[in-house]
């Protein structure tokens, strides 16, 4: 089963499952998960080929949806599910194929469509693959080396959270080969087999400065998620939960409550 970080709560409310995006991990959601656990248990995931979860050549959305289903079945059989970016597509796939497992659905800055910007993600993977890491002893040196290929300091800081400098040889906590091989499929939206519209409550959050979820996507979303609501967070981009965490938390808590 996927590696999970559990934030317990003294309540009978169903748990909230958090499915991170590409290059994300459960630990990235620590602060938000702690705050949301005031009202319900929260279970943050390391998706397959990320963090401390297992590695597998199959990184399809069908496989990721099965992974999330397995976690839900191990924790009561029904949950609210929140996914960001890649995790959002996995969460949508789950809701469309196993709706009995999902009470409410939260999708953060993602639409059920193809995104044709694989070059930028591929360059990040190549930068990590080509960076010399076996002699690293500090994160500052790692940042300096990664900066030779990745200019943005925020992107470097985010990726370096998944560079393990302890417990054995230095390593990336990503299956970079599998992610590179599956990148086109990650950016695509293959309609799930046996898909039926998800009739439960669904919240689609987007960042006002992001291009990932646009008003022209609403009709396609409503065809699959008839109860979808749309909320735009001002001043936020694709990483809306990191850029505007309090606003993000408030919108999610209000919807789940």
Image (cartoon, rainbow, N blue to C red):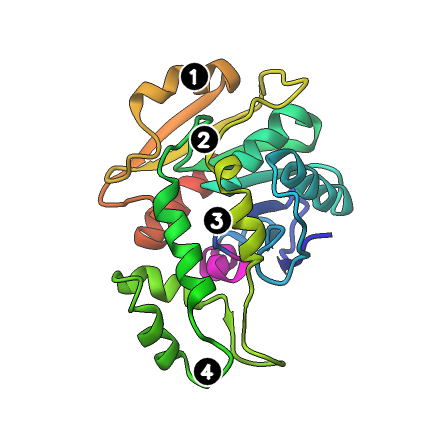
Q: Residue at x 54, y 49 (%)?
A: 179
- Secondary structure beneath dot 3 equals loop
Q: Which residue is mark 2?
A: 203
**Circle 1 crowding by C-alpha within 10 Å: few under 14, some 14–19, many from 20:** few
- Which is nearer the N-term, disc 4 or disc 3? 3
| Number of the front mark, 1 or 4 | 4
- Which is nearer the N-term, disc 1 or disc 4? 4
Q: Which residue is mark 3?
A: 22
**Span colored in magenta:** 25-35
Whether the magenta-drawn stretch holds residue 159 is answered as no
State the separation of the CA atoms marked 4 and 3: 24 Å
Asked if labels 4 and 1 touch by Cβ distance under 8 angstroms, the answer is: no
Instruction: Determine whether, in the image, residue 221 is placed left or right of residue 147.
Output: right
Q: Which residue is mark 4?
A: 136
At which x and y percent is residue 213? 35, 31
- Secondary structure beneath dot 2 equals strand
Whether the magenta-drawn stretch holds residue 34 is answered as yes
From the viewer's side, name the closer residue of 14 and 27.
Answer: 27
Residue 174 visible in the current orientation: yes
State the separation of the CA atoms marked 3 and 2: 20 Å
- Which is nearer the N-term, disc 2 or disc 1? 2
- Which is nearer the N-term, disc 3 or disc 2? 3
| Number of the front mark, 2 or 4 | 4
Image height of 102 relative to 147, above or below:
above
Q: Which residue is mark 1?
A: 220
- Which is nearer the N-term, disc 3 or disc 1? 3
At which x and y percent is residue 136? 46, 82
From the viewer's side, name the closer residue of 234 and 180.
Answer: 180
| Number of the front mark, 3 or 2 | 3
């Amino acid at each position: 089963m996927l590696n999970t970080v559990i934030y317990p709560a003294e309540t009978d409310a169903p748990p909230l499952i958090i499915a991170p995006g590409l290059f994300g991990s459960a630990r990235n959601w620590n602060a938000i998960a702690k705050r949301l656990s005031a009202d319900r248990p929260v279970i943050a995931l390391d998706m397959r080929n990320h963090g401390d979860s297992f590695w597998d050549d199959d990184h399809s959305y069908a496989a990721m949806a099965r992974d999330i289903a397995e976690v839900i079945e191990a924790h009561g059989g029904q949950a609210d599910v929140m996914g960001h970016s890649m995790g959002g597509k996995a969460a949508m796939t789950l809701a469309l194929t196993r709706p009995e497992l999902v009470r409410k659905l939260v999708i953060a800055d993602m639409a059920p469509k193809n995104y044709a910007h694989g070059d930028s993600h591929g360059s990040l993977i190549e930068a990590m693959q080509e960076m010399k890491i076996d002699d690293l002893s500090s994160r500052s040196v790692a940042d300096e080396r990664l900066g030779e290929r990745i200019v943005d300091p925020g992107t470097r800081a985010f990726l370096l959270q998944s560079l393990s400098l302890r417990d054995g040889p230095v390593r990336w906590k990503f299956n970079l080969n599998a992610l590179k091989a599956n990148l086109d499929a990650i950016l695509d939206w293959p309609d799930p087999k046996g898909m039926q519209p998800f009739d439960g409550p669904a919240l689609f959050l987007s960042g006002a400065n992001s291009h990932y979820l646009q008003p022209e996507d609403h009709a396609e979303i409503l065809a699959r998620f008839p109860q979808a609501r749309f909320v735009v967070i001002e001043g936020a981009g694709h990483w809306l939960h990191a850029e505007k965490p309090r606003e993000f938390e408030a919108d999610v808590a209000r919807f789940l409550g």
